[in-house]
Image: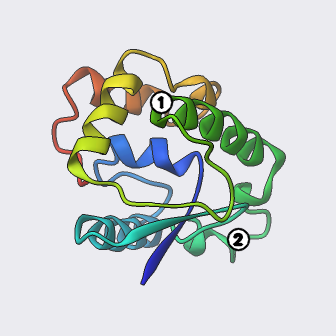
Amino acid sequence: MTVRLRAHHLLCLLTYVGKGYSPAFTANYDKVVGRLGEGEAVLIVSGPDDICAPMLSEPEPHCLGEGAAERDGLAARDVGALLGRPIQAGDRLVLDASGLSRMRKAFSAGLTRQACSGCEWSGLCSAVAGSGFHDTRL
């Protein structure tokens, strides 16, 4: 199987410590992280992904908004530059330990954080990065 992820969730995964919008959201996120931890590949998608799924039943899910799409574009650009390859819908990649470590170092250095500007979770993510990514689930 393959985990469907939008580009900005490549950054969100780096600091995920089990907090989220709702209990259903975090339970689902834990399942997605478990699948990635077992080595499932990632398929980059445009729009809502496997992490967004529990929010799609809300009246106005923010994952359908313009802001999320803008974050995707910025994250794809920055992560692509870091990895030395374009990141776009349809791409597949595996998030192995080496790649995650490299992405976390760049995140801590602020090299891939432009997509995080204005995000309500940015403070938490900064704290997690500042702690050396202690207690992250992936």
Residue bearing mark 2: 58
Colour mapping: rainbow
Element marked by disc 2: loop
**Can the viewer see residue 4 in this picture?**
yes
Asked where in the image residue 45 lies, by quadrant, the reply is bottom right
Query: Which numbered dot is residue 82?
Result: 1
Q: 43 or 61, which is in the foreground?
A: 43
- The residue furthest front is 84
Q: Residue at x 34, y 55 (%)?
A: 95
Left or right: where 115 falls relative to 126: right
Element marked by disc 1: helix
**Can the viewer see residue 120 in this picture?**
no
Q: 119 or 72, which is in the foreground?
A: 72
The quadrant the N terminus occupies is bottom left
Tell me where residue 11 appears, x and y as whole percent.
Answer: 47, 41
Left or right: where 128 falls relative to 7: left
- Label 1 amino acid? Leu
Task: Give the vertical position of 18 relative to 49 (above or below).
Answer: above
- The residue furthest top is 109
Tell me where residue 61 appears, x and y as whole percent.
Answer: 73, 62
